[in-house]
Structures are given as structure tokens and as C-alpha cells.
Image: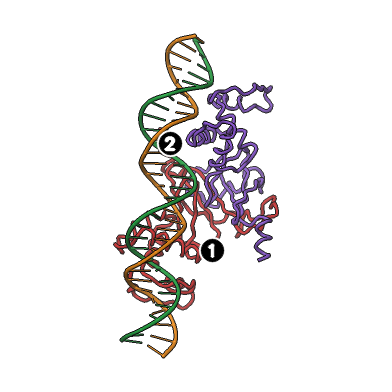
Chain colours: A purple, B red, C orange, D green
DNA sequence: TGGTTGTTTTGAATTCTTAAAGAAAGGTGA
DNA sequence: TCACCTTTCTTTAAGAATTCAAAACAACCA
């Protein structure tokens, strides 16, 4: 992978992907830029699908490269990884805002949900068992409109 | 597996495991009773560990039998299955009360947390995207006292 | 532009979980 | 209690998602 993408720069407001990578101390590679682009276009995407998408642009890319990149970017805080029960890990670019998710039990569709109660909802549980809590992850389960309609029409 | 455990009966209040199985329309087998016992003694236990525990009592038991039983009991509502990110599925006997979980990022320890806000907390998200929501699953992430101490002592 | 270090490829293994088919045990009615 | 039908269990396999290790390669700084 050779980094030959056009150079974009920003004046601070919205850092470009390149800048975000550099700020995170990661080298700027085409693979990483491509993965960032893919996940930006299609939120809640599994590694598998990222891999296939990346391959359209960068045919030689290996599955492991994609797993590495997703792991690196997640660790760097550029991606967020969620793992709804029964689903492979999903990645999204919306990070740092503690938003939640709504998952369809039938088709697995995922939607973002803003925090219900202010900025850090539910972060104060009734008991803490002495834990140093740093995140409250909320997953809403139900049926999406399509599956809901399909079910009630049976 | 032959069901030869002593027969216990209850007068409605707290149904015995046998009664719970029967009520669920499941046959009473030693395997199922053993699994229920194991999970009752050790909440948040993975299939793997259930298997090893069951084998101490019933040496011939197969891994798949345990997976089958765990699946059947979960489907019947006698067990609850949770899948914290990065962990294999965990099972617990505490069902039907919509309680939540506190997971240690370091060692994976899991603690139960009662609902923070009344009976069905967080069940009303800020947006529903047309979904028919039936459950709000909350997972608190942090460090358990032990791991917390180990980290700050580094 | 060279060297160093970080990334990616290559090739393979692991972990968790489900599938299928036959054997065995549970439950029911006579 | 016996025969029969059904559910459950064992055995054997397979599959998906993810990770590991080492060598080849590319990005970046001086």
C-alpha cells in the first residue's frame, strides 16, 4: 500500500483523517485512510464488510491488515467498536460522544441513539461494587420497522 | 443421564428447578438440573466452565450437551445469557428482573447491578427510529477494586 | 536518500458455537 | 409393566470470527 491520496489540510476545526492519524502517532497509510473512509460512509460495519470494501480500492489488501487497522484505529480512538450480542464486532466513526445503539433482533440493523439523559446517562449505577466505572454502554433491543411489519403480517 | 435426584416439591411460592423445567415444557434430566445448579452457584459463567463443572458430577457429559442445555434453558427463560464485548457468552440464573452488569475491563469480572432508574430504566430512548423496543441492556465498564489497585500501584 | 521503525502480507492456528445423525433415555397409554 | 413415540444426548464435523508469528515491505526523520 502506497500513500498517494491527495493531500488535504485543515486549520484546526475539523482535522482531516491524515491529521487524525498523525495526531494519534500513527503513520499515514493508504490502508488506514481507506478504512476510515469506508467506515465513515457505512457506520456499524463488520470487519468482513470493511475488508470487502477496502479490496475494491486496494485489491491486494489482506484480511489481517484490515483487522490490524481496525484494531489500531479503535485503540487510537478514531473508531469505536461495538459488539451487540450475536453479531460480529461493528465499527463506526462517531466517537467520543457516548451515544448508544438500537439493534433489531430480527435483521440486526443498528441505529444510533443520542444519550437519553443528558451527557453521561446511566453513568451512576445504583451500586458500584467498588469499581472505577468509566463507561455506561446502553443497547436497546427491539424490532426495526421493516421486521416489525413483516412479523405482524404473518 | 438418569434423573435420580431426590424429589423436592414446593407449594407455588418458589418453584423448584424440576418444576421450572416442567412448567417450561422441558423434560427433567440430570444434565439440566446439574447445569441449573452450577449456574446458580456461580453466576456469569461461560459455557466452557459450566461444562467442566458439570463433568465433575456427570463425567460422560459432552460439550454439545452443555451447549444444548444452556440454549434450551435460555430459550425457556430459566437462564439469562449475556455477551459482554470481548468475552464468550455468560449465563446466570437471575432472570426476569432486567438487572444490569458491571464488567471489569482488565480481568473480566462481572457484577450485577440493580436498575438505576426504577424498574425499566433507560427504556425510553431519546429517539426510537420506529423500532418496537422491548429491552434496554446496560453494561457498565470499569476496573474492579483488585485491578484498580494493581494499576495504581504500577 | 538511507536507515530505522512501524505496517502489511503470508500462512496458519485458535476459540467459540452450531449442525447432523444415530443412540439412548424420558414419558404416555394400554 | 410393556411398547411406542418423542425428546435429549453423544459423536463427529464443520464454520465463522478473530488472532498469532515471522518475513517482506513502506513511511518517515535526519
Q: Position of residue B48 (x, y in %)?
A: 38, 54
Give me the residue at 41% from left, 62% from top: B40
Judge the density around disc 2: few (<14), some (14-19), many (≥20) Cα neighbours within 10 Å: few
Q: Secondary structure at mark 2?
A: helix
Judge the density around disc 1: few (<14), some (14-19), many (≥20) Cα neighbours within 10 Å: few
Front-most of A143 and B16? Answer: A143
Which chain is indicated by disc 1? B
Q: Which residue is mark 1?
A: B96
Side of B112 where A43 appears, left or right: right
Above or below, B60 against A140 in this view is below
Q: Which residue is mark 2?
A: B151
Measure how far apart labels 1 and 2 are at the Cα level. Answer: 36 Å
Is tag 1's residue or tag 2's residue first in the polypeptide sequence? Answer: 1
Give me the residue at 55% from left, 23% from top: A2
Q: Position of residue A23 (x, y in %)?
A: 57, 25
Which chain is indicated by disc 2? B
Residue B46, quarter of the rendered image: bottom left
Side of C28 where A24 appears, left or right: right
Indicate the quadrant containing the C terminus of chain A: top left, top right, bottom left or bottom right. Answer: bottom right
Side of A121 where C29 appears, left or right: left
Q: Is residue B85 visible?
A: yes
Q: Is residue A95 visible?
A: no
Give me the residue at 30% from left, 60% from top: B56
Amino acid at each position: 500500500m502506497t500513500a498517494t491520496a491527495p493531500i488535504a489540510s485543515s486549520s484546526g476545526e475539523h482535522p482531516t483523517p491524515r491529521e487524525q492519524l498523525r495526531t494519534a502517532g500513527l503513520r499515514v497509510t493508504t490502508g488506514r485512510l481507506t478504512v476510515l473512509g469506508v467506515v465513515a460512509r457505512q457506520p456499524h460495519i463488520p470487519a468482513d464488510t470493511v475488508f470487502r470494501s477496502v479490496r475494491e480500492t486496494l485489491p491486494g489488501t489482506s484480511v489481517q491488515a484490515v483487522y490490524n487497522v481496525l484494531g489500531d484505529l479503535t485503540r487510537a480512538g478514531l473508531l469505536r467498536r461495538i459488539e451487540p450480542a450475536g453479531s460480529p464486532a461493528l465499527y463506526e466513526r462517531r466517537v467520543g460522544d457516548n451515544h448508544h445503539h438500537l439493534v433489531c433482533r430480527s435483521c440486526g440493523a443498528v441505529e444510533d441513539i443520542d444519550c437519553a439523559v443528558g451527557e453521561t446517562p446511566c453513568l451512576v449505577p445504583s451500586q458500584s461494587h467498588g469499581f472505577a466505572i468509566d463507561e455506561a454502554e446502553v443497547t436497546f433491543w427491539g424490532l426495526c420497522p421493516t421486521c416489525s411489519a413483516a412479523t405482524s403480517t404473518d
